[in-house]
Amino acid sequence: MHILDPQQIAQLDLNDPLARFGMEFAKPSRENGEPWVYLCGNSLGLMPLGVPAALKVETDSWAQRAVEGHFEGVHPWMDYHQRFSGPIARLVGAEACEVVAGNTLTVNLHLLMAGFYQPDTGPMTMAVTSF
């Protein structure tokens, strides 16, 4: 058996217990209609089809309540981090009291640096690197 045997690949696809979830995502296609082969690991991934409706609920709440959306509406925003603690804890094998959801890595690093950075009276230097 060759690893790229099309018949074997088709059989594996038929037996894949997760295959049904593929229908729950938007799949871009090329101008000629061919589907993309999407292997980008540094992205949001394919958009779940439920996202537009979920976003509409939140943007409607924002439009109707403005800042009060933090405390009112279908999903008040103020305690969102607490709603995610249980699922994130299960995902990483921790207790809910040991995890918190908040910001992105970039924002968290900025907040960490801003909180601890104590400039002195000497010249200030910032090093920036890129990969």
Image: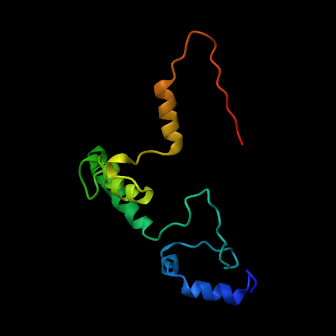
Whether 108 is drawn above or below 41: the answer is: above
Q: Is residue 15 visible?
A: yes
Q: Residue furthest right?
A: 2
Please name the residue shown 52% across and 80% down the image.
19
Q: Is residue 63 visible?
A: no
Please name the residue shown 67% across and 72% down the image.
37
| Left or right: where 97 falls relative to 21 | left
- The number of discs equals 0
- Residue 48 in picture, x, y percent from top left: 48, 68
Please name the residue shown 39% across and 59% down the image.
90
Q: Residue furthest top?
A: 121
Whether 85 is drawn above or below 29: the answer is: above
Placement of the C terminus among the 4 image quadrants = top right
Instruction: Name the one closer to the observer, 100 or 55.
Output: 100
Protein image colouring:
rainbow
| Left or right: where 95 falls relative to 6 | left
Please name the residue shown 51% across and 18% down the image.
118
- Residue 121 in picture, x, y percent from top left: 57, 9
- Residue 79 in picture, x, y percent from top left: 29, 48
- Residue 127 in picture, x, y percent from top left: 67, 28
| Left or right: where 51 falls relative to 31 | left
| Left or right: where 73 falls relative to 103 | left
Q: Residue furthest left?
A: 72
Placement of the N terminus among the 4 image quadrants = bottom right
Whether 66 is drawn above or below 61: the answer is: above
Whether 88 is drawn above or below 97: the answer is: below
